[in-house]
Amino acid sequence: MKRTILTLVMALIFSLLFYGTFVQLVESQSFETIVIRADGSVEGTDKIQRDGNIYTFTSNIEGLIVIEGNNVVLDGASFTLQGEITINGNNAETKNLKINASGNAIEIYGSGCKILNNEIQAERKGIRIRDSDSNVISGNKINAKIEAGIAFETSSSNTVTENTIAPSLLMGGVDLYDSDSNTFSSNTIHFVSLYGSSYNIFDQNNLPQGIAIRSSSNYNQITGNNIIDFNELNETNIMSSGSITLFSCEGNVISSNTIVNSGGIFLDTSSNNVLRNNVVSGTGIGFEVSGSPQPKLSSFINDIDDSNTINGKKIYYLINKSDLSINPSTYPNIGYLALVNCTRMIAENTHFNTQGILLAWTTDSQITNNDISNNYGDGAILNYASNNKITKNNIKANSGAGIKLSYSNQNLVSGNYITRNQMGIYLILSADNNTITENNIADQDIGISFHTSSSNLIYHNNFVNNTKQVDDASWGHPQFPGVPLPSENIWDNDYPIGGNYWSNYTNLYPEAKELDSSGIWETPYVIDENNQDRYPLINPIDIPPVEVPEAPDGETSTTPSEDSFPTTLVLALIALVAIVGVSLLVYFKKRKR
């Protein structure tokens, strides 16, 4: 289904780009071309009055204005240009103009230019700055329909301040491509995208749809910005999430930003970034560090201290620590705990009720006697973590998996109450040779799920009233047998110890009988052709209840929202493609008339 969504997105993008390109090419044919020459002369109109180097509109104009000269001041005097402006000269200034453009409203190829106090409506880009440096963009209202409000291409040392840049459909408000050392302050920008762009500063901006920093965009400073109420917006850019997102970049400073009722802060395959004094509040996952497609330890090495908070609780991000006890006394008010490349750690007697706990490249550690409940996303995540123990925890009502293991081996999961999560335990991507025993796994969509994870020993658990007791990713693709590879696990500890208790056993095997008064059914519980519990238990295992001390200082948990399939997104994309088609038909009819 993800491939279907991607196909729709690409179809939409190409349709819109074609539409914008077509309209720009056809309509530009009717424009008169007005040129301000290098010698100061004006060709192509009598509606621009020259006074020295100042060129003032005396009426509305339809046409393409090309500025060849340096130090030209083009004053729109609040008149309207139905057309576009191309600036080839240096130190040119364009101000006080209303522009309605069928393509890109302003294109800047010179340097040291100023774009001040204009109102810009553009079918494609509002302002395009290419191979151009040291420009000032200030006090403008920019509304670009399809592409970026301001697009920077290999352009540096520009200053953008006090502009209002509305959302566009594809690229958002500001798009930087291979552009360095630009400064953005006191703007309202609906979504920002950086690609291969470094040493930029975003300070004290309103960013309602967030900012994405990607592909070797390094050493940028994102400070004091606000992302507020993204979840309340009726129209959003298809690439935005109301978050600060870093992908494949390093050395960025993310500090003193406020994210409310929106997304969060997400680092993916990014290293040596610094996070300080950021405040995230609202519903959904508010903070995450990950690596894709196959994580490396370096992706988790970032400088993140406890001045960062989620819903008023602290983020504790510990790297290269050993022999520490983490509890409400030593690490109070925990909103999120990450143990990265740590050894012999103990997390105990704590309420993880906001964002959960992560162990990455951490060994010989324990998560014991905690309440890991009501978290957004997964409760406890083990990533390349081995020889750890997750024991005697209450793990319930998390919006993702209660426990998720990936690339993690030789761990013990025992004595836990794992209930009412989306799925109880999720073993993915070579989570092999783990032992899962004496857990109560109940009342979930999926009790335990596998994706290419084998040789796990699973016995003496109670699988009770899960919609699916067991699931395997290989079952979902019958048209591609063996993709992904099926998981093969061990579901009992031989006779007479036995296997697991299955609440649906008697419905599946109504004729089954007890084996030699052993408390074990004689008929195996068949999961698939590679997996069966040979000695299923007749009665549930008695698992002692978990008693976690009350949360100190009146701390309370929050309730996660349920993540749903993005049906709305699919319908919206289909509708947008249809709108483009109708727009083209209407446009052609008008041209014929």
Image: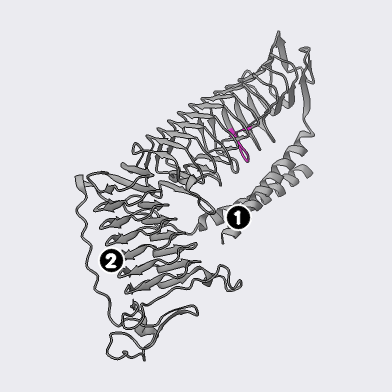
Q: Quadrant of the C terminus?
A: top right
**Picture residue at 22% right of the left edge, 65% below the top:** 545
Q: Amino acid at mark 2?
A: Gly
Mark 1 or mark 2, whichever is nearer to me: 2
- Provide the secondary structure element on which disc 1 rests: helix
For residue 209: magenta? no
Snapshot quadrant of residue 224: top left
Residue 495 is left or right of residue 237, and the answer is left
Label number found at residue 6: 1
Please tell me how crowded label 1 is: few (under 14), some (14-19), or many (20+) other residues with Cα within 10 Å: few
Frontmost residue, 297 versus 56: 297
| 475 versus 337 height, above or below | below
Snapshot quadrant of residue 415: bottom left
Frontmost residue, 445 versus 546: 546
Task: Find residue 285 and report its horizontal and vertical position in percent.
Answer: 41, 49
Label number found at residue 141: none
Q: Amino acid at mark 1?
A: Leu
Label number found at residue 415: 2
How many angstroms separate mark 1 from mark 2 (CA)?
42 Å
Q: What segment is highlighted magenta in the picture?
A: 143-152
Please tell me how crowded label 2 is: few (under 14), some (14-19), or many (20+) other residues with Cα within 10 Å: many
Number of labels in the image equals 2
